[in-house]
């Protein structure tokens, strides 16, 4: 459309020039002048229309640019009226304070401030409204929706209208909470460090030796306590005399032969009361304006307490390690006993169930062979009735030992309950399980009790894992059912059954 307006304007100019020339030639000035004015008016209207379109387009583009900058500002920004009521907020402010946009736009910005900073902020706003300042820059605290205090670096700018009356405020907030937390943490650690150094005032010694190390020109009170009262002509030898004989060569070498400008050494010394101290000493040389050694400054710090604590800590750690080992062994024993049947020493029902569950999952993944044998003592009630429960216990313990003796380490033997014992043969199919039964179970056992030989026969059921068995409970049920069929055949003196399905 702007291009059309320009074209119309050009045509109007050409036509006007043509008519003007014609009027001059034919002396028709009044009519020609009228037509020229009309065309020029059209040209003016077209140009004005084009200019208006361009201005409106520029304003729309500028508004869009300002809105984009407002929303994408790296800082939290809000616009309030002269009374502090929020008119517009960006997403950064929403994230900073935790309120929604609608909630913020119903609030006064003083409600967002920490109560301790509210009065100070109000006073600053009154000053800026009075014209004393054009903007305010300060650090202040805010309360989030969750009640958390956050620090922000605040920039408050007042925008006035054409009559120089307060129009609205633009508030920029930079989140500096992490910086303040770091500063507070640093101050806390500085305070702790200062407190930590207080005990050193009574456990340190400092001195100054002349350049030739032949004269002790200065020493503090702590020096006398640790190294003893020096004579008027005391030298480096006075310091070395207090050092433990085993550490003396090392200290002498560091203090007299070190090529470095400063030195650091740990040693032991005996104080005037012959108490042993662990020390760390540091020192440096002092040079004059001609770069000549003027003196040596040294300081020693008593670290006996730290060394003692470290030794005690090491001893405590050794004792703790020993206690942990004992505790671990006790836990392992307790765990083992909690998974064992107290009478037979076999796996208890819980441990047996876990073993069956593990084997069932292995079969589902790899289709590995496994067979479960359910073993029951025939006429067990009659044994208890005739010989007593001690005899019954003897039968169960003898059967448990018999099965453990003839099973493999990879197998699991567990007491399921009463006189029922389960035997999990890993990697064995039904034929192999029946072969094991013939050699170990079918012949029964003989139990010696109260000088009597008690022949014991056993009923046995088989359950080989197959795709139709989809749970441990079903596996146990198949084995249990097969065992009861064998008990029935025992009563009728029938041969060993096949697996029940």
Image (cartoon, rainbow, N blue to C red):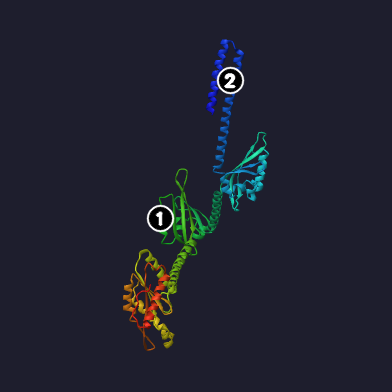
Position of 275 compared to 66: left or right?
A: left
In the rendered image, is residue 344 in sight? no
Q: Position of residue 481 (x, y in %)?
A: 40, 75
Q: Which residue is mark 2?
A: 39
Instruction: Give the x, y percent position of residue 211.
Output: 45, 50
243 or 306: which is nearer to us?
Answer: 306
With respect to residue 318, does 116 lie above or below?
above
Q: Earlier in the sequence, mark 2 or mark 1?
A: 2
Location of residue 35 with respect to 348 vertically, above or below: above
The disc at residue 308 is none
Label 2 crowding class (10 Å Cα cut-off): few <14, some 14-19, many 20+?
A: some
Residue that carries the numbered disc 1 in the rendered image = 253
Q: Position of residue 311 (x, y in %)?
A: 46, 64
In the image, residue 67 sits, relative to residue 428, either above or below, namely above
Q: Is residue 481 visible?
A: yes
Rendered-image quadrant of the N terminus: top right
Tell whether 293 sits left or right of 201: left
Q: Secondary structure at mark 2?
A: helix
> Count the marks: how many?
2
Decide which of 388, 19 is in the foreground and name it.
19
Q: Residue at x 56, y 42 (%)?
A: 71
Q: Quadrant of residue 471?
A: bottom left
C-alpha distance separating marks 2 and 1:
110 Å
Which of 237/85 is in front? 85
Q: State the image quarter where residue 241 is shown.
A: bottom left
Graded by Cα atoms within 10 Å as few (under 14), some (14 to 19) or many (20 or more), the crowding at tag 1 reads few
Secondary structure beneath label 1: helix
User: Residue most toward the bottom?
Assistant: 451
Task: Pick the quarter of the image with the C terminus.
Answer: bottom left
Foreground mark, 2 or 1, reads 2
Residue 335 picture location, percent across and down:
44, 72
């Amino acid at each position: 459309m702007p291009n059309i307006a320009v074209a119309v304007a050009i045509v109007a100019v050409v036509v006007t020039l043509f008519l003007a020339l014609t009027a001059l030639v034919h002396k028709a000035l009044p009519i020609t002048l009228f037509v020229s004015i009309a065309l020029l008016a059209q040209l003016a209207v077209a140009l004005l229309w084009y200019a208006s379109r361009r201005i409106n387009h520029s304003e729309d583009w500028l508004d869009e640019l300002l809105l984009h900058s407002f929303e994408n500002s790296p800082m939290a920004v809000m616009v309030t009226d002269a009374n502090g009521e929020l008119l517009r907020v960006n997403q950064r402010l929403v994230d900073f304070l935790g309120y929604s946009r609608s909630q913020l736009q119903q609030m006064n910005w003083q409600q967002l401030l920490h109560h301790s900073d509210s009065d100070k902020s109000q006073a600053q706003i009154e000053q800026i409204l009075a014209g004393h300042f054009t903007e305010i820059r300060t650090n202040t605290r805010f309360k989030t929706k969750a009640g958390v205090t956050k620090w922000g670096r605040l920039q408050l700018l007042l925008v006035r209208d054409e009559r120089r009356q307060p129009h609205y405020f633009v508030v920029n907030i930079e989140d500096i909470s992490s910086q303040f937390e770091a500063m507070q943490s640093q101050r806390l650690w500085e305070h702790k460090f200062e407190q930590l150094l207080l005990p050193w005032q009574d456990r340190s010694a400092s001195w100054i030796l002349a350049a030739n190390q032949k004269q002790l020109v200065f020493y503090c009170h702590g020096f006398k306590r640790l190294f003893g009262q020096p004579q008027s002509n005391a030298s480096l030898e006075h310091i070395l005399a207090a050092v433990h004989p085993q550490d003396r060569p090392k200290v002498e070498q560091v203090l007299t032969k070190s090529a470095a400008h400063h030195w650091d050494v740990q040693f032991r010394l005996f104080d005037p009361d012959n108490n042993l101290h662990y020390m760390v000493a540091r020192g440096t040389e002092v040079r004059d304006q001609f770069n000549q050694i003027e003196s040596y400054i040294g300081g020693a710090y008593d670290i006996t307490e730290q060394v003692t604590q470290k030794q005690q800590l090491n001893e405590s750690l050794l004792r703790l390690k020993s206690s942990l080992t004992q505790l671990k062994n006790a836990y392992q024993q307790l765990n083992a006993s909690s998974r064992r049947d107290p009478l037979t020493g076999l796996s208890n029902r819980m441990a047996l169930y876990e073993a069956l569950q593990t084997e069932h999952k292995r079969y589902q993944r790899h289709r590995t062979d496994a067979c479960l044998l359910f073993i029951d003592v025939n006429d067990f009630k009659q044994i208890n009735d005739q010989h007593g429960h001690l005899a019954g216990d003897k039968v169960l313990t003898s059967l448990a030992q018999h099965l453990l003796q003839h099973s493999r380490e990879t197998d699991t033997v567990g007491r399921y309950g009463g006189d029922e014992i389960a035997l999990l043969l890993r990697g064995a199919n039904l034929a192999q399980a029946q072969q094991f039964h013939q050699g170990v179970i079918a012949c029964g056992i003989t139990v010696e009790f109260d000088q009597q030989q008690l022949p014991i026969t056993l009923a046995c059921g088989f359950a080989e894992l197959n795709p139709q068995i989809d749970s441990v409970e079903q596996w146990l049920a198949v084995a249990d059912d097969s065992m009861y069929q064998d008990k029935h055949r025992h009563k009728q003196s029938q041969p060993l059954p096949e697996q029940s399905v």
